Image (cartoon, rainbow, N blue to C red):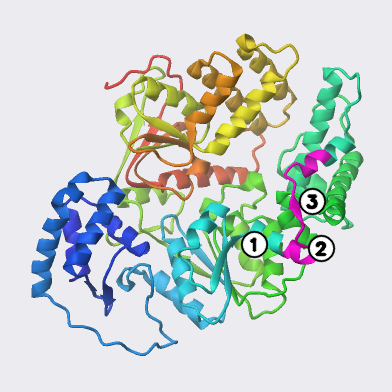
Amino acid sequence: MKLDTILDLFDEQGIAREEFFSLARRGWVPGRNICGQQWHIEDADFAQLMSRLAARLGKERLLAGLEKDFVRRVAATASAQKAPPVPETPHDPTEPAVSAPGLPQAAWSQYQLDFFAAVLAGKDNIALRAVAGSGKTSTIVEGCKRIDPAKRGLFMAFNKDIAAKLKSLMPENCEAVTFHAAGLRMLRQQLGDKLGLDPKKYQGILETIFPETPGDGWPEKKVVLQKRRMIGEIVEMLQANAVMPDIADFSDHVVKIIYEYGIEIDDLEGSLSLPQIVSHCRATICAGIEIAHTLLKISFSDMVYLPIFLKCVNAQPPDFIFVDECQDQSAAQRELLKLIAGPAVATRIYAVGDPRQAIYGFAGAAINSFDLVALAFNMKTMPLSVNYRCGKVILARARAYCPEIQAAEAAIEGSVEALSFPPNGLDLSIFHERDFVLCRKTAPLIRLFFVLANAQKSCTLKGKDMGKQLCALVEKIGKRRGFRYEKFQDAAKKFFAKKIAAAKTPDKVAMLEDMAETINNLFEGLAAPDMAEFLERIKAMFSDSAEGDSITLSTIHRAKGLEADRVIFYGFQFCPLRWRGQLDWEREQELNLIYVAMTRAKKELLLVSHDFRLAASREGD
């Protein structure tokens, strides 16, 4: 049966064609590709495919018998177009066929085929410049499968969740790991298997450098805590940027870190001089190194940083390395990658990323990380410019931020609608089941959560870790001297007022104001009787996965890598965020966030302007 025939059947039943390719990428499409033109599926196999599709889409009507109608029509079509069996041919190492789960060969774009050819040739390190929705993960997984099975490789995943999911997709000769896991492995080779994790290691070091004096009042304790926070932030960024404590220009790097990341160094009485800051930063890093040697304790940041300082040698360098999301790599991760690859130039490195999706500068990733990776490993840059996710109209809007992005031939038209509502007039009927609501800030999402919940609309907030962070902040407010829960809002107001007064950069002020508003919205919306219940209710609001037909609310940062048929970009009029003293990389990241948000939408994109004051929202206008 021709692929077009199958896709036409999908169209007639109102099922997105992408569902077929999505199942194919997961290895759920039985049968085989014939000469790049036919997709031969037996009747029984097609019934199984429809059952899987039904489960995936949650459509009971498919399970109730729609697949039988598909099979009947497929069988009739197939009998008229029956393809002859294809004889087995010997494996040709110069032009391998698609094998194992993956897109059928007919669905690969020319960009992807060019990348596969370059991987097969093995002559160059490659930087694959992939736009949003281009199937980059499936592309590099397929590229990995095309390499000689006798060669051993690594797939460097962005986080441990992605690494775990990729394990079932990787061929046996390629292992999916994170940079932290790879660094830990090298450290244990050098320092021994008894090396243990201590997440609070540097907190303990800073408590030793800046101890509290018995009898000190809150003003004195506050200065001590601020010094610990300040040095801790600088050390964290020094490690992310692979700055070693024994280099001659260490102090210059400290100054650069303070400037580039807007770290406040003079916001309290008794603030440290620059030479003192440099000295404390060096002492903190050196103490961390000493503890790793003597007590065999390391932190998460040590897993990437210490192998570089110790110049660890990878005993068994891989033959090839695939690197995902290279636009979000820190300098330390780039240096660690060099150690993993080893000194042998024979190790081939294939990095994939989208410079327009670089949004983690605050965590130490350079805005031009993609280009820096390509430069560091003398890479040949190749494009992956076809988007298979979004409708054509959506991509036309996103092209303002990424001119090279292209629509797939089979892309639907899609739609983009701009809506604007007055302060007290948000129309809640625009929010549908399974919508993905994205916002640049957190506070508006919290407020919207309660508005939707009060209107009996099921919704969830994405990010359990965000819930934990908010709980930690609430607990800090609760530890203030003389705190009483019934006066929580007053305590929170004073807590944030002092932090905002101490903040020296406009972006810090904006972040603190957003957090203050978030905490206040939580307190008013949850109406918990005591602190323990307040914390439990905060935790219950957040989830890492969509629940049934509920509306998912998420910040743009947490939505990266996700998609939905219908996306509402809430608070669109405030993007890109601007503030006084904004740095160039910060301005560029704000534009990248708009691009990331828009390209989450598969069919419909709503750009909603609303100033977040929802005191008298109404439904159905």
Residue identifier under label 2 = 310
Q: Residue 372, labelled with which disc? A: 1
**Residue 512, image quadrant:** top right
Q: Nearer the viewer, residue 224 or 78?
A: 78
Indicate the secondary structure of the residue bearing disc 1.
helix
Was residue 306 drawn as part of the magenta stretch in this picture? no
Instruction: Identify which amino acid the numbered label 3 is placed on.
Output: Lys
Structural crowding at the residue carrying mark 2, measured as other residues with C-alpha within 10 Å and reported as few (<14), some (14–19) or many (≥20): few
Observer-side mark, 3 or 2, equals: 3
Instruction: Identify which amino acid the numbered label 2 is placed on.
Output: Leu
Q: Which residue lies furthest to the bottom in this view?
A: 90
Which range of residues does the magenta coloring cover? 186-204
Mark count:
3
Q: Residue 297, labelled with which disc? A: 3
Q: Which residue lies furthest to the front in this view?
A: 194
* Left or right, residue 31 beside residue 101: left
Residue displayed at 72% across by 38% down: 262
C-beta proximity under 8 Å, tags 3 and 1: no
**Residue 429, image quadrant:** top left
Indicate the secondary structure of the residue bearing disc 2.
loop
**Residue 261, image quadrant:** top right
Residue displayed at 36% across by 34% down: 550
Q: Residue 560, labelled with which disc? A: none
Of marks 3 and 2, which one's residue comes earlier in the chain? Answer: 3
Estimate the x, y position of residue 403 in percent, counting from the top left.
44, 55
Residue displayed at 29% across by 55% down: 19
Give how far apart the Cα atoms at labels 3 and 1 are.
32 Å
- The answer to whether residue 359 shows anywhere in this view is yes
Instruction: Identify which amino acid the numbered label 1 is placed on.
Output: Leu
Structural crowding at the residue carrying mark 3, measured as other residues with C-alpha within 10 Å and reported as few (<14), some (14–19) or many (≥20): some
Estimate the x, y position of residue 8 in percent, counting from the top left.
17, 60
Of marks 1 and 2, which one's residue comes earlier in the chain? Answer: 2
